[in-house]
Image: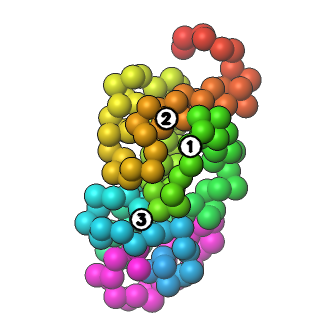
Amino acid sequence: MKIPVTINGKKIILDENPDEKLLFVLRKQKLISVKIGCEAGKCGFCTVLLNDKPVSSCLIPVGIVKDCTIETLEYFSKSKEYKDIETGFLKAGMNLCGYCNSFKYFSVYRLLKDNYRPTKAQLIELTTEDKCSCTEQGVFMNGILYATAARHEREGRKKNVKI
């Protein structure tokens, strides 16, 4: 089946079985940031942005991504949002294992895109969803808070001002 899609800013036509999982199609495209993990949508290792929302690519049949936009960490790492998150993670002292990077970066990206300043409950919810044990929950929360501050600074927003 011919499937038009935009992957990492490039429009292409995939010729794949529509039941093939997006994870394996992306791996065939040499996009190695999309890791193979549990293949059940629980670990987050295969997370990508599908139409700007984080999804587990192991759960998505490629047949349903027709005319969609997909971003992997390779492409996202060139964005200003990635730099904000990376700054926050580094400031918090986070050392990622390499498998969970896409889950952590994309879930924080979405949280910060949807929220000017995430609440404690939102931080707890997101960090509890993370199934990788390479980063302690408190350190991950601090990384998100530092990323929020980096974003605000980049955008020229005043500190501690409620909107």
Q: Is residue 43 above or below residue 62?
A: above
Of residue 131 and residue 20, the one placed in the foreground of this image is 131
Give the residue drawn at x 52%, y 30%.
142
Give the residue drawn at x 60%, y 39%.
93
Residue 10 place in picture, x, y as percent? 63, 71
Left or right placement of residue 80 versus residue 3 in this view: right
What SS does tag 2 mark? helix
Left or right placement of residue 90 versus residue 66 in this view: right
- Residue 50 visible in the picture: no
Residue 3 place in picture, x, y as percent? 44, 80
Q: Which mark is residue 139?
A: 2
First reached walking from the N terminus: tag 1 or tag 2? 1
Give the alpha-carbon distance from disc 3 to disc 2, as whole Å. 22 Å
Region rendered in magenta: 1-24
Could you tell me if the residues under marks 1 and 2 are in contact, i.e. CB atoms within 8 Å?
yes
Q: Residues within 10 Å of mark 1 (few under 14, many from 20)?
A: some
Q: Is residue 22 magenta?
A: yes
Q: Quadrant of the N terminus?
A: bottom left
Give the residue drawn at x 66%, y 14%.
159
First reached walking from the N terminus: tag 3 or tag 1? 3
The residue where tag 3 is placed is: 46
Give the residue drawn at x 35%, y 31%.
124
Q: Is residue 28 above or below residue 51?
A: below
Residue 8 place in picture, x, y as percent? 60, 66
What SS does tag 3 mark? loop
Of residue 39 and residue 55, the one placed in the foreground of this image is 39
- Residue 92 visible in the picture: yes
Give the alpha-carbon distance from disc 1 to disc 2, as whole Å. 7 Å
What SS does tag 1 mark? loop
Say which amino acid is labelled 1. Answer: Met
